[in-house]
Image (cartoon, grey):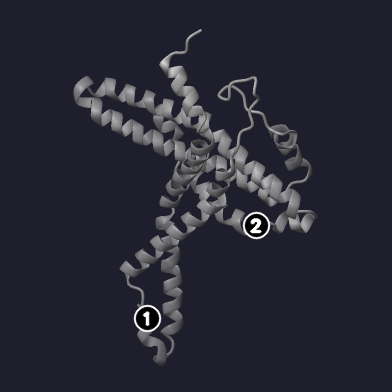
């Protein structure tokens, strides 16, 4: 049977999955981390304000250090809060998005690559989840869960972009009612497509990374808790912000 042009193109692009699939996972996670970090700017500014107020109280007690009171103006505090948010975001990208570059697929020679992906027995969902329950570690639980939450936030960010672009482009042509329905439908399609094609793979890759690292370095109760704790503690608040403030799933249907 002759192949159509789209089939040939699909097979040709399939040869480059090793390159664009890891980059897609990295991009989805990075967008989700950025969306979560954006919601923390005001909270970080409040923390900086509290620290500055405490500093002013201390230096204001002594005549020698009185000149240091109000060292940080509102503009400087805002800049400092933004710098902290950026540093937090980039560090979280290293923790969650960087492992995505190690994503690989092993395919059977008898099955089309786009239809089936084979994993080694130790890296199947069932095997890794069983080890999460039998030998729990900080990395095994926090990293995949954080990845899942920021991946949803990243997909929501792209879906909102699709919704806004379609609505503004089609409103005058089709009317507000039709444009709104079409925009919501395409946004939901983008959201579902991203989670279906990239979201679960991002979680799987971080689960694989956490599982392998735990097997090598997290033997014993103390090591299971301490290994990877700084990175996990850094991404946990961002994941919570992603779930609470950056994933408006219901907004696409209301």
* Mark 2 neighbour class, 10 Å CA radius: few under 14, some 14 to 19, many 20 or more: some
* Mark 1 neighbour class, 10 Å CA radius: few under 14, some 14 to 19, many 20 or more: some
The residue that mark 1 highlights is 69
Q: Residue at x 77, y 45 (%)?
A: 135
**Number of marks present in the image shown:** 2
Q: Where residue 82 appears, x then y in whole percent?
A: 39, 60
Farthest residue toward the front? 2
Q: Where residue 55 appears, x then y in whole percent?
A: 45, 77
Image quadrant where one finds the C terminus: top left
Near-viewer residue (81 or 194): 194
Farthest residue toward the top? 1
Going from N to C along the chain, the mark reached first, 1 or 2, is 1
Secondary structure at badge 2 equals helix
216 with respect to 203 (left or right): right
3 with respect to 174 (left or right): right
127 with respect to 203 (left or right): right
Q: Where residue 90 appears, x then y in whole percent?
A: 47, 55
Q: Residue at x 20, y 22 (%)?
A: 173
Quadrant of residue 252 in the image?
top left
Residue 45 vertical placement versus 184 (above, below): below
The residue that mark 2 highlights is 229
Residue 52 vertical placement versus 125 (above, below): below
Q: Residue at x 44, y 62 (%)?
A: 84
How much space separates mark 1 and mark 2, taking CA atoms?
36 Å
Residue mark closest to the camera, 1 vs 2:
2
Q: Residue at x 48, y 38 (%)?
A: 24
Near-viewer residue (225 or 20): 20
């Amino acid at each position: 049977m002759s192949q159509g042009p789209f089939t040939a193109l699909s097979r040709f692009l399939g040869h480059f999955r090793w390159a664009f699939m890891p980059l897609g996972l990295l991009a989805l996670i990075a967008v989700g981390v950025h969306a979560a970090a954006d919601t923390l700017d005001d909270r970080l500014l409040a923390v900086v304000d509290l620290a500055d107020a405490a500093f002013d109280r201390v230096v204001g007690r002594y005549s020698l250090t009185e000149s240091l009171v109000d060292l940080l103006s509102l503009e400087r505090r805002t800049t400092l809060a933004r710098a902290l948010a950026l540093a937090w975001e980039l560090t979280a990208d290293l923790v969650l998005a960087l492992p995505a570059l190690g994503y690989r697929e092993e395919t059977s020679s008898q099955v089309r690559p786009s239809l089936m992906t084979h994993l080694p027995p130790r890296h199947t969902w069932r095997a890794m989840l069983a080890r999460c329950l039998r030998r729990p570690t900080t990395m095994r639980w926090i990293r995949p869960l954080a990845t899942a939450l920021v991946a949803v936030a990243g997909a929501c960010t792209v879906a909102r972009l699709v919704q806004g672009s379609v609505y503004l482009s089609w409103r005058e042509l089709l009317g507000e009612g039709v444009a709104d329905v079409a925009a919501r439908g395409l946004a939901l399609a983008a959201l579902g497509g991203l989670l279906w094609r990239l979201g679960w793979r991002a979680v799987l890759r971080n689960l694989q990374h956490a599982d392998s690292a735990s097997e090598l370095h997290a033997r014993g109760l103390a090591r299971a808790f301490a290994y990877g704790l700084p990175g996990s503690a850094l991404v946990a608040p961002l994941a919570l912000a992603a779930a609470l403030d950056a994933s408006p799933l219901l907004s696409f249907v209301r």
